[in-house]
């Protein structure tokens, strides 16, 4: 199983590199890239889907859930690298399908995987760290965990979401990312997000 995950990571890395030219072309256009982020069970996917529907933007799903559901064993640190590479590949594919224009709504980015790794293992793969520092997005929407915890077999941190929210905010600040804090119910968050996006410089 471990060898299979390493092979998967290698194949994914090759596809990521092959897609890089297409993605770099989109950077020269005006595709605005928005990341929805925050601790577990803070309404990220609900916001991402609602915002994509409202704006007509392209939606990039989180790949970690599908990866872990198919894994058939406890995940390892190496799996986090494979998940990170698969997330970038998925994003690159959707950017290409969208023609590099419009709005891209990402239901996570590698900052989440970096925090996940540092919380779980005390460190993070250098490639993931580099991507969090260099990969460009226009805005991060940081979701407040101001809603009831929704149990899920893949979730791990029901009791310290507020602490993790602070971890996310400190990371965004340390990396110099432009972000806004989203709170309240679904409609309120979508309204807040739309306003934050409209404030972006075109």
Image (cartoon, rainbow, N blue to C red):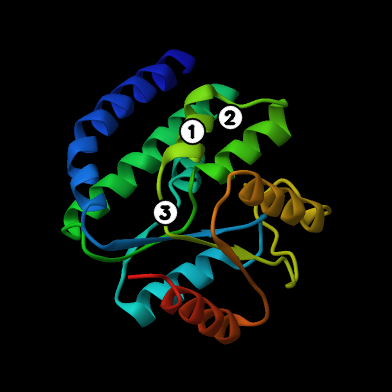
Mark toward the start of the polypeptide (2 vs 3): 2
Which residue is labeled 2 in the image? 75
Mark toward the start of the polypeptide (1 vs 3): 1
**Residue shown at the point (58%, 81%) measured from the top left:** 186
Which residue is labeled 1 in the image? 71
Does residue 2 appear left or right of residue 143 in this picture?
Answer: left
150 vs 112, nearest the viewer: 112
Please indicate, yes or no, whether residue 124 appears anywhere in the rendered image. yes
Counting from the top left corner in percent of width and height, residue 117 is at 63, 32
- Is the residue 139 above or below the residue 148 in the image? above
> Distance from label 2 to label 3 (Cα)?
28 Å
97 vs 41, nearest the viewer: 97
Counting from the top left corner in percent of width and height, residue 46 is at 52, 71
Q: Are marks 2 and 3 in contact (CB under 8 Å)?
A: no
5 vs 90, nearest the viewer: 90
Which residue is labeled 3 in the image? 137
**Residue shown at the point (67%, 75%) measured from the top left:** 183
> Which residue ends up furthest to the front in the rendered image?
201
Q: Secondary structure at mark 2?
A: loop
């Amino acid at each position: 199983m471990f060898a299979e995950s390493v092979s998967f990571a290698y194949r994914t890395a090759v596809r990521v590199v092959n897609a890089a030219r297409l993605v770099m072309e989109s950077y020269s256009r005006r595709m605005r890239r928005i990341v929805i982020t925050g601790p577990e069970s803070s309404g990220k996917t609900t916001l991402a889907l609602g915002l994509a529907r409202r704006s007509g933007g392209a939606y990039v799903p989180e790949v970690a859930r599908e990866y872990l559901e198919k894994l058939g064993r406890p995940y390892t640190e190496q799996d986090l690298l494979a998940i990170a590479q698969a997330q970038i590949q998925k994003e690159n594919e959707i950017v290409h399908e969208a023609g590099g224009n419009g709005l891209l709504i990402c239901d996570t980015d590698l900052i989440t995987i970096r925090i996940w790794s540092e919380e779980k293992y005390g460190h993070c793969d250098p490639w993931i760290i580099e991507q969090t520092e260099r990969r460009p997005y226009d805005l991060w929407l940081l979701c407040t965990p101001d809603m009831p915890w929704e149990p899920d077999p893949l979730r791990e941190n029901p009791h310290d979401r507020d602490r993790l929210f602070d971890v996310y905010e400190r990371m965004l600040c340390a990396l110099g990312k432009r972000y806004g804090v989203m709170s309240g119910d679904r409609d309120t968050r979508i309204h807040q997000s739309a306003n934050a996006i409209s404030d972006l410089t075109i």
